[in-house]
Image: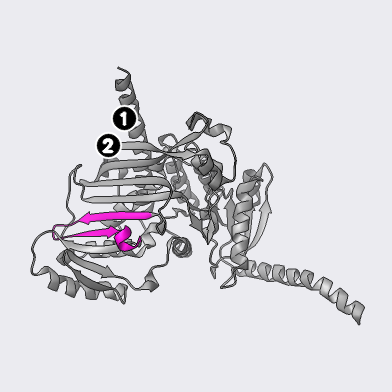
Amino acid sequence: MKVFATVHRCFLPMLMVAATSASAQDAQKKAAFQLVTLDPGHFHAALVQKSMYPEVSPVVHVYAPAGPDVKLHLDRIQSYNKRPENPTRWDEKVYTGNDYLEKMLAEKKGNVVVIAGNNQKKTEYIKKAVDAGFNVLADKPMVIDARNFDQLKDAFAAAAKKNVLLYDIMTERFEITTMLQREFSRLPTVFGTLEKGTPDNPAVTKESVHHFYKYVSGSVLQRPAWFMDVAQQGEGIVDVTTHLVDLVQWECFPNQVIDYKKDIRLNTARRWTTDMTRSQFQTITNQPTFPAYLKKDVVNDTLLKVYSNGEINYQLRGVHAKVSVTWAFKAPEGAGDTHYSIMRGTKANLIIRQGAEQQYKPTLYIEPVAENAALESSLTAAMKTVQQQFPGVELKKLKTGWEVVIPEKYKEGHEAHFGRVTENYLSYLKAGKLPEWEVPNMIAKYYTTTQALEMAKSTKERMSERAKE
């Protein structure tokens, strides 16, 4: 009996693994969608899998070069599988040969490729995956320079021919204050109509502040060293500003097609660096020295200058907009990434603030542009429409207007928004199509960012030449 008990204990883990594997295989057969993860160098790849989805197989095939990037990705997935509350049950099948891309394309172990990693390779990855008949869910940015913009357009054209869906991960559309800002802007009795603005006083302004040192899923985020290389990650003006340009389109012209050739006019664009010491670099990468590919951006072998900041001043269908992104190394104590946004209407301005006064939590305000005794009654009546879509949302009267009071149930946080985007994308896959405006507006968005980078570079070069004179 003792021998049997010992043998039983030895084989129990093996039996459990076998049972789990069999269960995963059964679920895979029943699932409509099977994920493939390609070269996951960014933590956003893992956040797509922070939740399970009923129609998605738990078996995920990963193709990547061997190294720290894929290891960090798998560690994050494992942490979701092992968490005490609502653990996931992903079963990762990993291939790390040098021919990982060719292997993925040849084996075709799934029908949806998730791409979130080194942006230098991303546009090529997207095009080849689409050409092979994969649906693609890609992290932003899909393209980081004007040189590859046409390749991205070709990828969208190929997706249409192959009848597959190419989509980018726009998490900020699911942030509750942004959703409500959009909703209130569609109520003419409250907002009026969107102003046209001027370059000095845009109708729409969106600013975001980000930090290299941050916590993700409860742990300090370890970033790959290449994240600080703009040749691989992309400059700030084509990276995070993707979200801001997307929101300008999504809020100002909801569900409408943007034609990048007719509707967009760039006014000015600029870029500047964030300085990072060797010690700071080591803190977030666990690498004691700057790799060779960063030497071009290092001063005196001690200070890394990263072109992570950018600003675009442009017109969209005649509406003046300004978007800007700034990166610091670390946020002040108690703070984090922040967002500021204003939409100026003829009757009221809709403003999102996220500073110390708001305890660094995004808060939406409605502020009249002039004395308007009828606005309060109009707003009270309009709230019935808002509350149909967002039950529990209320108003708090202030001297300057109103604060929109949002129940906690809507404040999910950035990480949860990846699940929302994925659920949305899955609904499009089941329908077999994207909304008519999504593809042209993605193309318009990346035209804006990549052309702005070209303008910012040429502007800086002209300024340098003048300085020499």
Q: Amino acid at mark 1?
A: Thr
Number of disc labels: 2
Please name the residue shown 24% across and 63% down the image.
365
Res 152 quadrant in image: top left
Q: Earlier in the sequence, mark 1 or mark 2?
A: 2
Q: Is residue 237 magenta?
A: no
Residue 307: where, in percent of width, then height? 42, 37
- Give the camera-side residue of 19 and 85: 85
Residue denoted by label 2: 268
Tell me if mark 2 has few (under 14), some (14-19) or many (20+) residues whose alpha carbon lies within 10 angstroms of its own: some
Side (left or right) of 30 relative to 264: right
Marks 1 and 2: CB-CB under 8 Å? yes
Q: Amino acid at mark 2?
A: Thr
Side (left or right) of 54 relative to 458: right
Q: Is residue 271 above or below residue 117?
A: above
Residue 163: where, in percent of width, then height? 48, 54
Residue denoted by label 1: 459
Is residue 105 something one can see in this rendering?
A: no
- Element type at mark 2: strand
Residue 269: where, in percent of width, then height? 30, 37
Tell me the distance, in whole angstroms, between the alpha carbons under discs 1 and 2: 9 Å
- Give the camera-side residue of 166 and 302: 302
Please name the residue shown 22% across and 72% down the image.
396
Res 435 quadrant in image: bottom left
Extreme residue in the bottom direction: 1
Side (left or right) of 181 relative to 145: left
Residue 19: where, in percent of width, then height? 73, 72
The label on residue 388 is: none
The residue segment tinted magenta is 338-360
